[in-house]
Each structure stands twice: as C-alpha cells, then as structure tokens.
Image (cartoon, helix red, strand yellow):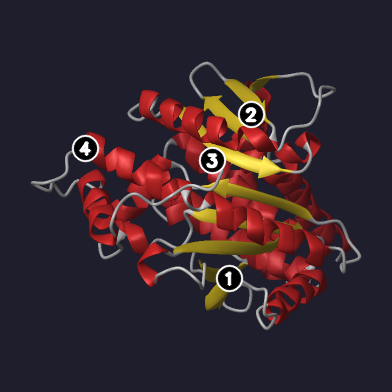
Amino acid sequence: MKSILKYSKSDIDKAGNVLAGRPDQKINRDQSIEILENFRSIHNHPLIVFRMSLNRKTKNLTGDVLISQRLKRAPSIVNKLKIQKNMSLSQMQDIGGLRAVVTNLDELYKLRDLIRNGEKQTAFKSTFIKETDYIKAPKDSGYRSIHLIYKYDKKVPSNSQCRIEVQLRTKIHHAWATAVEVIGTYLRQPLKQSFGDNELLELFKEISKVFILIENSEFEQDLFKKTAARINELKLRDKLKGFSVATQISSQDKKQERGKYYLISLNFQKKVLNVKRYSESKLDQANNEYAELEKKYLNDKNVEIVLVSVDDINNLEKLYPNYFLDTQEFVKLLDIIDQKINEN
C-alpha cells in the first residue's frame, strides 16, 4: 500500500532539527520521530518503481548483478543531520537507496548509461537531479562508487516529492566499503563518515589506492609493499577475521518460501543476528515492525536494525555483509596484494 505524506516540508525540517539536537517550541521528540517515520515511508513506492526498472536494465549485462533496496536507518539519518548541520531532513538524498553491485568497471558504466538513457522515456516518472562519479574522483576517504540522485514523482507537487539515491559499485568497491563499515560498526566509530581511528582511516585510503591499481591490472611496487607492511603492522586481517567468527547467525530456515523484505537485527553484545522475512504484501507490517524496533533500541548502541529488500535470501549476505560482520571478500583482495608483490 502506497504511503501518504501527512506533514508539510516545514514540519519535516523542524522534526529533523529536533532529532539533531536543535529544539523547537512546537514539535517535541516523540512527534519528530513520528514525522520522520512517515516521511521515510513515502520512499517505499518510488524505490519499488525504480527497482523494477533497474531489474529490467541489468538483463542487458553479461556478468552477475546483485540488487538491493533499503530505507535508511533512523539513527543514521539523525547522525547525518548532526554531522552535516546545513542539511535539512526534507532534502536528504539517500533516505531511499538502491544499490547494484556488478562484476567490473565496464559493466558498471554500461549500467550507468542504461539508467541515464531511460530518463528520456515518456514513462519515466523521476526527475534527474545529479550524478557523482566517485570512481573518477574518489572521496578523500578512498570511497568509490557512482551515485545517481532522482526526485520522484514528476506529477506531484515539488514539496511532496522525495529523493532516491542509486549506488553503482563493482565487487571491489563493495568489499572495501563493507570492511570500513564492519570495523567502524564494531569499534563504535563512524569510519564511514571519516571520523575515528586515524591510523585505520589512513590505511583504508592506501588500500583503496592499491585496489584501483588491481582493478586496472596495474602494479606499483613501493605502494603495494608499503600498504602490505601497514596491513600486517595493524593486524588488519586478524581484526576482520575475528569479527566474522564472533558473530552467530540466528535466522529462519533458508529452505522456507522466499520473502521480499528482510528485517535485520544485529546485537553486538550478544553477537547474534536475527533475520525476519516478509512477503511483498506484508510491506506495511514490515515498516511498522521496523519503526517499533527502532524506537525500542533507539538509545542502545549495541543493536542495529535495518529493513532491506533483495530478490533472494541467499544474496542477503553478499549485499549486506556488514550486518553479518563478513569481510571475506575484502580479505581475499588483501591476499592479492601479497600475491602481486611476490609475482613482481
């Protein structure tokens, strides 16, 4: 069922201010949470529409493609508003997010072109806002991806439109970003936002540079050796392997009927991951239970909750390995650094 926006743009932004720690005389914290939940819920429909279009376009690619969608976690929304003080809640671009992970750069840019060409079709309901290529110009942190921002729907008033972010990554980009999230999550440090342990942040920058060379079949001996030595010095492999081994997964039997939406709850203290499935017709129930769990654990830093959608539960861990504390693909890439050094 399509959600209806119940609040004005002004109310949404006031709620964002309250949640970010800037009080408002007319809206309290409980009302602000309710407004946030309603505003977030209207992103579901455009996500579904865009997802269907994305699924069709990926059929033109030769390699495997993993596609997922998610509504941004309330704590992540609040944290972003706190860090980026000039950002308003109504203008946040990634509350509704789609991600496509492809095999290589050629496939990534082919998919980007297919998406952009689709904008010319009369049935296309979104308005293109901007494209940011973090591959040609990586973030200072080393993060790489292509972000496409759209506004949905052309036919409704501008103040009722919401933004959708589409992330395009290769498997290498995804492995790097996942490792940053896993360590940041486990250490309770926002490494993803470039805050926290400076040694780790600098190391991930260097690793990103090495991964660029690996992706382009290039080799720089000094950089590879320097990075490999730093990886060993900080015992990065041991830290990552330790995280994944420590986590026990508690979920429904994968042999049961597939769901469409998955509510993931990760408890770091108990080291238990729970996954609850919902069919497509149960989206409203999934959203309600997502909101209730977020309220319950709003101030508990040991628990992370997220509602995502994937076509197959077997791809859940591949697309969201950070919630499984799984960095196996990243560790394999670290091993490739050593192999390249030995080969040369």
Q: Horizontal placement of 117 versus 151: left or right?
A: right
Q: Amino acid at mark 2?
A: Gly
Q: What whole-number distance in Å separates the C-alpha atoms at marks 3 and 2?
A: 11 Å
Between the C-alphas of marks 1 and 3, the distance is 27 Å
Please name the residue shown 39% across and 42% down the image.
Answer: 37
Mark 3 Cα within 10 Å, few/some/many (few <14, many 20+)? Answer: many
Q: Earlier in the sequence, mark 3 or mark 4?
A: 4
Measuring from the top left, give residue 202's x and y in whole percent: 50, 58
Give the spatial CA distance, label 1 vs label 4: 32 Å
Structural crowding at the residue carrying mark 1, measured as other residues with C-alpha within 10 Å and reported as few (<14), some (14–19) or many (≥20):
many
* Residue drawn at (47%, 46%) of the image: 41
* 343 vs 193, nearest the viewer: 193
- Secondary structure of the residue carrying numbered label 3: helix
Residue 340 at x, y percent in the picture: 82, 61
**Could you say which quadrant of the image residue 240 lies in?**
top right
Q: If you read the primary sequence from the N terminus, does the residue marked by circle 4 or circle 2 appear first? A: 4
